Amino acid sequence: MTEFLLPAFLFLIAGVISVPIASRLGLGSVLGYLVAGIALGPVLSVLGVDVIQVQHFAEFGVVMMLFLVGLELEPKLLWAMRTRLLGLGGLQVGLTAALIAAAAYALGSAWQVAVAIGLIFALSSTAIVLQTLNEKGLMKSDGGQASFSVLLFQDIAVIPMLALLPLLATQHVTHEGDAHGGMSLVEGLNGWQTGLATLAAIGLVVAGGMYLTRPAFRFIAHANLREVFIAAALTFVIGIALLMSLVGLSPALGTFLAGVVLANSEYRHELESDIDPFRGLLLGLFFMTVGAGIDFGLLAAEPLTILGLTLGVIALKAGVLLALGWAFGVRDEQGWLFGMSLAQAGEFGFVLISFATAGAILPDDIAPRLTLIVTLSMMLTPGLFILYDRVVLPRYHAAEPRAADDIDRQGRIIIAGHGRFGGVVNRMLLSAGHETTVLDHSSNQLEVLRAFGVRAFYGDATRPDLLHAAGIEDARLLVVAIDDRHRATEMVRHVVKHHPHIHVVARALDRGHVYELWGAGCRDIIRDTFDSAVRAGRSTLEALGMHPFEAERTARTFVNQNRRSMRELADLYDPEVPNHENAPYRDRARELMDEQAEEMRNRGRGAHHEGADGAWARPTLRDQEAARRTRD
Amino acid sequence: MARILHIFAHPGLASSQINAAMWHAAGRVEGITSVDLYAENPRYEIDVAAQQNRLEAHDVLLLQFPMFWYSAPALLKEWIDLVLSRGFAYGAGGDRLAGRTMQLAVSTSAPAEAFGPDGYQNFPLRTFLTPFEQTARLCGMRFLAPYVRHDALHGDGSAHAQGFARLLAGLRDGRLDMDRAQAADALFHDTLPLREG
């Protein structure tokens, strides 16, 4: 037991300590994990932990990451980005790989090794860049969008790269059962049979994803047990990875495909938030194993060569990016942002290195140097962002004042809970031409909504991770219409605290709930049955013979008074003390009731009554006297 | 028989003297359509198509209201803005009201002399009513002199209300001398140009 628990504990504690520190310093979690791994390295080697074995296990995080990338890829979104994705992304990967390969060849590598090195350095760090751009609020800028397109292309390009790398092998893999090996379904089949089995497996993933997952997930969702859904999501991803390995394909390719197939499913956000923690932990573990594997002896032995190569790679990548950005209209400070943010090598570089080493493509003396260069380039990224902030930005900002914010970017509207209340809100918003994202945890309900073309997703809307997956960061508005009063309040508290820019409209179930929501920071609270009760009161007054317009005005006055007193009493409300025992609350409530009764009585006397609200009060004789004097 | 649409606009019927008496008197005139606009549209939700259909089904539009700040109460203004729309009442194809008749029945709190020479209102009453007159003209409608009660804060409204009922019945039966009614400056309960019938 301890031989498993001890390394697990060490990895976890190292990550738990170093990642928050790295985040606090603005370095990002990837660097945190790398540093944790570097610190762990000596300890692990003393304990005799097989770091390479752990790393192969942790690579499953990459498979999960590609599943999530696939989930994000709505075909519509892809189509809108096609020019930048293919043009900018394709040229960046192609040009960078070619230039670096040429440089490596010139420095004396065999051409196969040079190509592998080119591919490794063509990639940038999705994890570091996206996180940093998000933190700095630069995702929606031109440079940020261009960076995102390129990263997306790279993430997809990794799949063919993993497939093509074995073709570069300079020597036959002789060691028994390579790291990824094991069982194979296609062993012993000839060429066309293998091809057929491969096609059948891909067909199975696509068809299964399209037709089988929905009924299966619906069945599981009915059980309403979160852990069962998580287990199902893991089964799904692991099953596909297994199937792909069995027919000799990249598991990452399979899960990526499955992700794309499910990108339009109502279970997308739920799958995303269920898989994401596993992806995060496994990738963290992966980075730590990379950190632990860094050969510092090497850096000490040849510091100038390694540092020189690192800076050379960064300069070359930045140069390619700047030129491409300029050609695609991403210029000035946006061009610099694009060039400097993507100049490092990335986590997929580690994956390619370990894959290429296992496949005997890279000589054993080159791989550790490459790992070191990739790591150093990632560690220098925060420095590049600081350079951008301090040196590049002031130049452009001094020259021209910043244009007004992009206001035509329409923020998302999230509706949590699609029952009778949220449903009406959603229908109104849709009919006014807004796009909404609906979250609900009734799978029957979702079935119906989807049939009518509503963007609805399964999941418990009160979970912050699901809100995150639904895009709360970019949202403009959140409507809280879930039935559980306590969870509704907690949800409001969370969103108001962490996303203060979002306007929250919350449904309150009763007066106490109004106070709770007010206390949680919501300033747009709608009482569930209040409006219908007011209308019933108005109807009753009309039935008693009151003029319909008088009844309408009476109702309006009542609503306004009620709202005023509610606001006043909200400050006296104490969730710990029942209202009737809360003396200040009780006394003020009584006073307010008396004041209101008095006001309503005057109001009831209607137009032309002097005093009251003075509406349409007619002039008096004295007024006419005064008017007559205006003549003189 | 002319078809009369009597539209009454007063936001505070409960405290009204003259206009309430007129409204009740009109209720006793048979064969006309009387509408309490504030009761029909208490939330200002005017169904334009329905209002236009009803308007087209009548020959005479009679608007009854108290003068508020030299104009009509807000809901009647809203009604005019929405119902007398382009393509219906005016503009291209907007000839659906042409040939019909419009008349106002208004009350003012100021006495008659306030609208006379040296009166404190500075202008004759008809000057304040020119927006309505020109509205009728633009719709191709004949605009009759208004049926007026000044000094509405005083006195008993019964004579004026009975006159109003006679005016409505006269319009209905074609006994109102339309030419004289058009030529007059204002009509009062004792100056109605009615023929005996």
Image (spheres, rainbow, N blue to C red):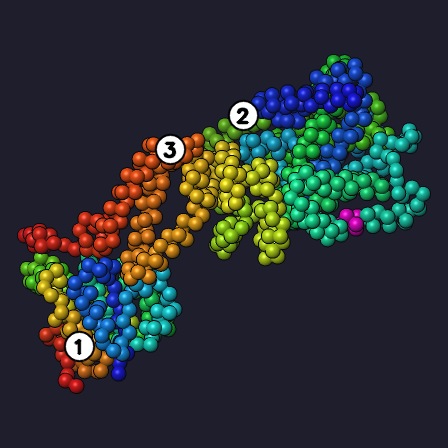
Q: Is residue B16 left or right of residue B59?
A: left
Compared with A551, B92 (above or below) is below
Which amino acid, by three-letter code, is at mark 1? Arg
Compared with B132, A584 (above or below) is above
Foreground residue, A618 or B29?
B29
Q: Where is the N terminus of chain B found, in terms of image quarters?
A: bottom left
In magenta, the rendered stretch is A202-206
Which amino acid, by three-letter code, is at mark 2? Val
Labels 1 and 2 within one chain:
no
Observer able to see residue A187: yes
Instruction: Pinpoint residue A418: horizontal percent, then vertical percent.
Output: 54, 49
Q: CA distance from mark 1 to mark 2?
A: 89 Å
Question: Helix or strand or loop: what does disc 3 sit on?
Answer: helix
> Which numbered disc, 3 or 2, marks the residue closer to the eye?
3
Residue indicated by mark 1? B166
Residue indicated by mark 2? A391
Residue at the image point whose x is 72% and y is 39% from the top: A231
Foreground residue, B195 or B98?
B195
Residue indicated by mark 3? A581
Instruction: Pinpoint residue A11: horizontal percent, then vertical percent.
Output: 71, 22
